[in-house]
Image (tube, helix red, strand yellow):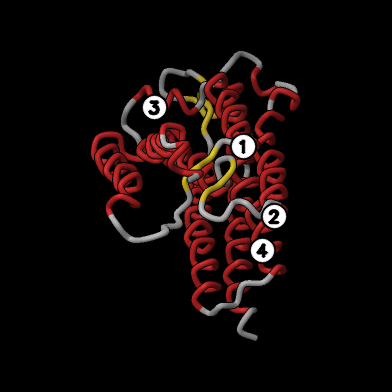
Amino acid sequence: MRKQIPNAFTILNLLFGCFAIVVILQPGLMLSVDETGQQTIEIPQKFFWASVCIGVAVLVDFFDGLVARALKASSEMGKQLDSLADVVSFGVAPGMILFEFLKRAYAAQPNGLDVSVLWLLPAFLIPCAGAYRLARFNIDTTQTHYFKGVPIPAVGICIASFPLIYWFSNTAWMIELMVNKWFLYSCAVVLSFLMVSKMPVMALKFKKLSFAAIWPFIIIVVVAVVSALFLGWMAVPVSFIAYVVLSLLLKQRIVS
């Protein structure tokens, strides 16, 4: 029975991933006409709740591992279940966010609502790459204190910030960036590559609690706080970039 407690957290992670997908599947693009008679395209306001659901799934995903270690209830089934939940919450749901934003990007163009679905499919590189990375992680016994490739929750929370940036940013270039198809394509390709690559990436696992051990994470926290003050929700992708760049700079330190 004790081993089922962390599994319950994992199922909750999966459940919030499903909630995110349900929100994203609400009625799509809406046409409206402003006072000048110009046609505009809108995404339903409830869409940003998918970001909230993914954010909660990240928290639950963190606690299931914490609870498993605290109760000494880790199991092979729990490991597999965690990966299955992560594919949905941090792979499929973020992939659908990219899919919807690509639809928005094309809808703003002439005859954009008639765009072929083939132009939107690159969004699903995210769940495909995430599933591959998780499968490789499950059979790799060397990833004890660091990761090979960026973990899928980090990619998921990065993409989940896009709707929040789009709706709650007052800066024009940020909003336009979220509906720029080339930016979205680049995100799909680069983030997928980062997941399937074997580059050493920092993990939130400390050999000992000392400044020498945790200073890279202190830097990321400082970057997150400062960027949040000036950039709002754009702080999430900025912090993600800081995480990746630091991992590249500290490659030798990470694997030692």
For mark 1, what is the residue?
Answer: 198
For mark 4, what is the residue?
Answer: 79
Q: CA distance from mark 2 to mark 4?
A: 8 Å
Give the foreground label among 4 and 3.
4
Indicate the secondary structure of the residue bearing disc 3: helix
Q: Residue 24 placed where, x, y %?
A: 60, 46
Task: Give the answer, above or below, for where 196 lies relative to 10.
Answer: above
Indicate the secondary structure of the residue bearing disc 2: helix
Give the foreground label among 3 and 1.
1
Whether label 2 touches label 1, CB < 8 Å: no
For mark 3, what is the residue?
Answer: 174
Whether label 2 touches label 4, CB < 8 Å: yes
Quadrant housing residue 229: top left
Pointer 3: residues within 10 angstroms few (<14), some, or many (20+)? some
First in residue order: circle 1 vs circle 4: 4
User: Type of residue at label 3?
Assistant: Met
Task: Give the answer, above or below, for where 49 lies relative to 115.
Answer: below
User: Type of residue at label 2?
Assistant: Asn
